[in-house]
Image (spheres, rainbow, N blue to C red):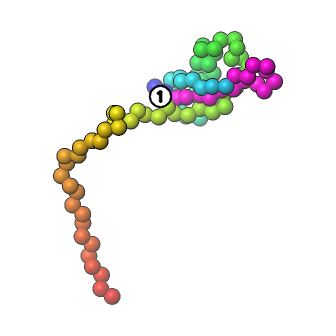
């Protein structure tokens, strides 16, 4: 399962406008009906009856965590890659 982030908003005509985002998991592909349905179901689970009139604006993948921690540099002990010499062309 992949984690996604869904952005939602309430109708403009409502007095208390709601806008925000939430995370959900889905096994469906990005942009598919199944993915949108999973987002809608998760929104209803989180917010209940208040979310019936809300709409989902967009869905995006949750970015992966960075491999570096605390901004420290990593040391690379691998042997340097040899560059290929190009054949010299004579004109």
The picture places residue 83, in percent across and down from the top left corner, at 24, 63
Taking the image as shown, residue 80 lies to the left or right of residue 36, namely left
Seen at 34% across and 33% down, the residue is: 70
Q: Nearer the viewer, residue 45 or 71?
A: 71
Q: Nearer the viewer, residue 14 or 70?
A: 70
Q: Taking the image as drawn, is residue 34 in sight? A: no
Q: Callout 1 environment at 10 Å: few (<14), some (14 to 19), or many (20+)?
A: few
Seen at 26% across and 76% down, the residue is: 87
- The residue sitting at the top extreme is 49
Q: Nearer the viewer, residue 64 or 14?
A: 14
* 44 inside magenta stretch: no
Q: Which residue is mark 1?
A: 2
Q: Main secondary structure of the magenta part?
A: loop
Give, as a single range, the part of the protein colored magenta. 4-18
Q: How many marks?
A: 1
Taking the image as shown, residue 45 lies to the left or right of residue 82, namely right
Dot 1 falls on a residue whose secondary structure is: strand
* 8 inside magenta stretch: yes
Taking the image as shown, residue 45 lies to the left or right of residue 81, namely right
Q: Taking the image as drawn, is residue 61 in sight? A: yes
Seen at 46% across and 25% down, the residue is: 1
Taking the image as shown, residue 27 lies to the left or right of residue 81, namely right
The picture places residue 91, in percent across and down from the top left corner, at 33, 88
The picture places residue 62, in percent across and down from the top left corner, at 49, 32
Q: Which quadrant of the structure image shows residue 65? A: top left
Q: Which quadrant of the structure image shows residue 46? A: top right
The picture places residue 71, in percent across and down from the top left corner, at 35, 37
């Amino acid at each position: 399962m992949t984690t996604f982030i869904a952005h939602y908003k309430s109708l403009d005509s409502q007095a208390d406008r709601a806008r925000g985002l939430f995370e959900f998991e889905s096994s469906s592909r990005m942009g598919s009906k199944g993915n949108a349905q999973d987002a809608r179901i998760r929104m209803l689970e989180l917010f209940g009856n208040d979310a019936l009139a809300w709409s989902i604006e967009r869905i995006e993948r949750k970015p992966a965590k960075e491999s570096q921690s605390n901004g420290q540099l990593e040391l690379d002990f691998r042997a340097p890659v040899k560059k290929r010499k190009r054949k010299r062309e004579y004109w």
